[in-house]
Amino acid sequence: MDYRSAMLLDSSEFDRYHAILSQSPLFHGTDSEFLSDKLLQLTPEQHSRHSVVLDAHQATSKFCLLVEGRVKLVSREEASEREVTLFLLGPGDAFDVVSLLDQQAHSLSAEALDDVTLLSAPVDQIRRWIMDHPGFNQTFLPYLGRQMSILSELASDLTLHDTGVRLARLILRHVDPNSPQHEVRLINNLSHEELAKMIGTVRVVANRQIQNLKRRGIIDARRGHLIVKDLEGLIQESHALLDRHAE
């Protein structure tokens, strides 16, 4: 693991990370004093791009809050080296919430897509937050529910939909609802290989589906950026009937 850590936040880091976490689903709406107190209990870490941020066994002892960059949670079959990205996380997200609750190691690893900064704490400490602070539970439990919903949607997509529909649904989930230009968050500059891992296919198939959406004027993808040009067309594609041949 490639990272650098420090035991204390300086004042500028404290204010910046407080602002990020206050907008996180995990803390949004909680008391500002509670967040300030808990922020002082966290240890900052910097990880380089492509490094393993947290492996399956570490997840039973350490909990992480992401404040800069993107991290993917990956399930990998070692024999075939095939992998599926189950979650793509950005600033304000946390991992691994499942191990936090069941205290079991899972076959997931957290890997940095960018140079990332995170705040970590022992899992037992976070469990005390859950037990001792009902206000935190009111934000933590819905966050956990959303992550379980993402897993359910992924399982449904992989089982029921072909790759074209899965790609459309992936893009649609990351469209910024507050952007009049339908800007795409988190996945907007990912490689076709990374997008393929998020829809359970291989790069050549993902590239073919991306080119199909481009030809039809639904998206534009160039110079590492993904733009939605026809939101209604993308929505229709994500609801396409299951009468296509699966890839």
Image (cartoon, helix red, strand yellow):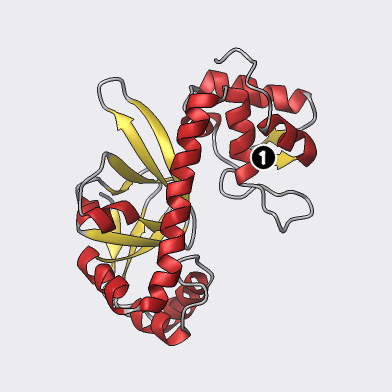
Looking at the image, which is closer to me, 191 or 30? 30
Q: In the figure, is residue 169 to the left or right of 67? A: right
Residue 5 found in image quarter: bottom left
Q: In the figure, is residue 244 to the left or right of 142? A: right
What residue lies at 47% left-to-right and 71% top-to-bottom? 21
Q: Is residue 161 above or below residue 46?
A: above
What residue lies at 20% left-to-right and 58% top-to-bottom? 61
Residue 151: % across, % down: 44, 42
Q: Is residue 123 above or below residue 246?
A: below
The C terminus is located in which quarter?
top right
Q: Is residue 62 above or below residue 158?
A: below
Total label count? 1
Decide: few, some or many residues near mark 1? Use Cα within 10 Å; few <14, some 14-19, many ≥20: some
Q: In the figure, is residue 220 to the left or right of 189? A: right
Residue 126: % across, % down: 28, 69
Looking at the image, which is closer to me, 72 or 235? 235
- Tell which residue pokes out farthest to the bottom in this image: 33
- Secondary structure at badge 1 equals strand
Q: Is residue 112 above or below residue 119?
A: above
Q: Can residue 111 be seen in this snapshot? A: yes
Q: Amino acid type of disc 1?
A: Leu
Residue 238: % across, % down: 66, 33
Q: Can residue 67 be seen in this snapshot? A: no
Q: Which residue is mark 1?
A: 226
- Tell which residue pokes out farthest to the top in this image: 245
